Image (cartoon, rainbow, N blue to C red):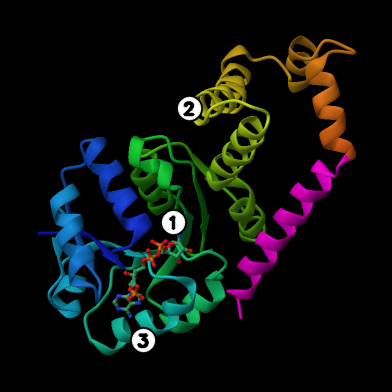
Amino acid sequence: MKTTLFLGAGRITGALAAGLRLAGDKRTIVAYDRNAEKLRALWRESRVELARDLKSAIEHAEMLIVAVRPRSVKEMLAEVAACSAAPPKLCISLAAGVPLRNLQAWLGPPVRWVRAMPSPVCRIGKGLTALCFDRGVSKAERARVRKFFEQVGPVLELREEQMDALTAVYSPSHGYHALAKLAAAAQRAGLDRNTALIAAAHALADGIEYWRRSGQSLDELLHEAATPGGTAAATMAAMDKSGYARAVTNGIRAGIRQARRNAT
Ligand SMILES: NC(=O)c1ccc[n+]([C@@H]2O[C@H](COP(=O)([O-])OP(=O)(O)OC[C@H]3O[C@@H](n4cnc5c(N)ncnc54)[C@H](OP(=O)(O)O)[C@@H]3O)[C@@H](O)[C@H]2O)c1
C-alpha cells in the first residue's frame, strides 16, 4: 500500500489533510510526529493514520512531505537518513525559507526536492500553493506534484528566488490582520463588535471577490467605490498620509528577512 506521508502533524498538515479529504482524495495519509495527541486529532478529523515507526512509514510512502518547522528540518531529515529506509525519489518540503540546496545537503541523491508553500485555506479547497522545483525534477513529476496540490486550490510555479517574497505576501494572515484592525477601528467609532466585523469583512472580502469576478481593474473599482471628495476618498487619503504604504512595505520586508533566516 503506497501512502502520502507527512513528517510533522501540526497546523499545515491538519489543513492539508482536511482539504485532501474534502476533495475526495482516498489515498492513505500517514503522519509522523512526536506528539501523540496531535496524531489522534488528525485521525479523528481526517482519518490520517499514525506512523508508529519512521522506517516502515518511509518504506510505504509514495509521497513524502516534510511539514516540521524550518528549524527542525535538518534534525528531521537526519532521522530519515538514519533509519535506513529508502525515501521516495521525490520529496516535498513545506518549510518556509529553507532552500533547495540545504534540503539536498541534508538528504541528497537519489532524492530530488520540491518546495511547496501551501496555505491553511486549503482546508476549504481554496488554498493557493506556490511550488518550486529542483532542476532534476522531470516534467511528469512536476505535473504529479502540481496535480496533488491542485486538489486543494490554485497552484503557482515560481523560481526559487521568488519564494520568500511570495511567502511574506500570500499569507491569509494579512486578511485576518486587516479585518481585526478595521473592525477594532469600527468599534472605537461606535459600532458593536458584530456589526463592526460584518462591515469590515464586507469591505475586504466582498470587495476583493467583486474585483476577482468583475474583471475590472483596481483603478476602475476605486473610482466606482470612492466618490471624489467623499467619505471613502477622505478615509484612504488619511490612511495613506499616516503611512499605510510604508507599514505594509515594512511588514513584507520583515517577513522576507524572517524567511531568509531559515536559509542559514
Ligand atoms: N502553518 C502554515 O500556515 C504554513 C503554511 C505554509 C508552510 N508552512 C510550513 O510548514 C511547516 C510546519 O508548520 P506548522 O505551522 O504546521 O508547524 P507546527 O504546527 O509546529 O507542526 C510541526 C510539528 O512537527 C513536529 N516535529 C518537529 N520536529 C519533529 C521531529 N524531529 N520528530 C517528530 N515530530 C517533529 C512538531 O512537534 P513539536 O511541537 O513538539 O516541536 C509539531 O507537532 C513549517 O516549516 C512552515 O514553515 C506552514
Q: Which amino acid does label 1 sit on?
A: Ser
Identify the residue position indicated by label 2 in the image.
Answer: 194
Residue closest to the far left: 1
Disc ID at residue 20: none
Q: Nearer the viewer, mark 2 or mark 1?
A: 2
User: Which of the 4 image quarters holds residue 242?
Assistant: top right
Residue closest to the far front: 190
206 falls in the magenta region: no
> Are circles 2 and 3 on residues that touch, CB within 8 Å?
no
The residue shown at (82%, 10%) is 227
Task: Magenta stretch: give its range.
Answer: 242-264
Residue 69 drawn at (x, y percent): 44, 70
Q: Which of marks 2 and 3 is in front?
A: 2
Judge the density around disc 1: few (<14), some (14-19), many (≥20) Cα neighbours within 10 Å. few
* Lateral position of residue 261 relative to residue 129, left or right: right
Identify the residue position indicated by label 1 in the image.
Answer: 138
* Lateral position of residue 250 relative to residue 210, left or right: right
Identify the residue position indicated by label 3 in the image.
Answer: 78
Residue 135 drawn at (x, y percent): 54, 63
> Are circles 2 and 1 on residues that touch, CB within 8 Å?
no
254 falls in the magenta region: yes
The tag earlier along the polypeptide, 2 or 3, is 3
Q: What residue type is labelled 3?
A: Ala
Q: What residue type is labelled 2?
A: Asn
Image quarter hosting the C terminus: bottom right
The tag earlier along the polypeptide, 3 or 1, is 3
* Lateral position of residue 75 relative to residue 104, left or right: left
Mark 2: C-beta under 8 Å from nearest atom of ligand 1: no
Image quarter hosting the N terminus: bottom left
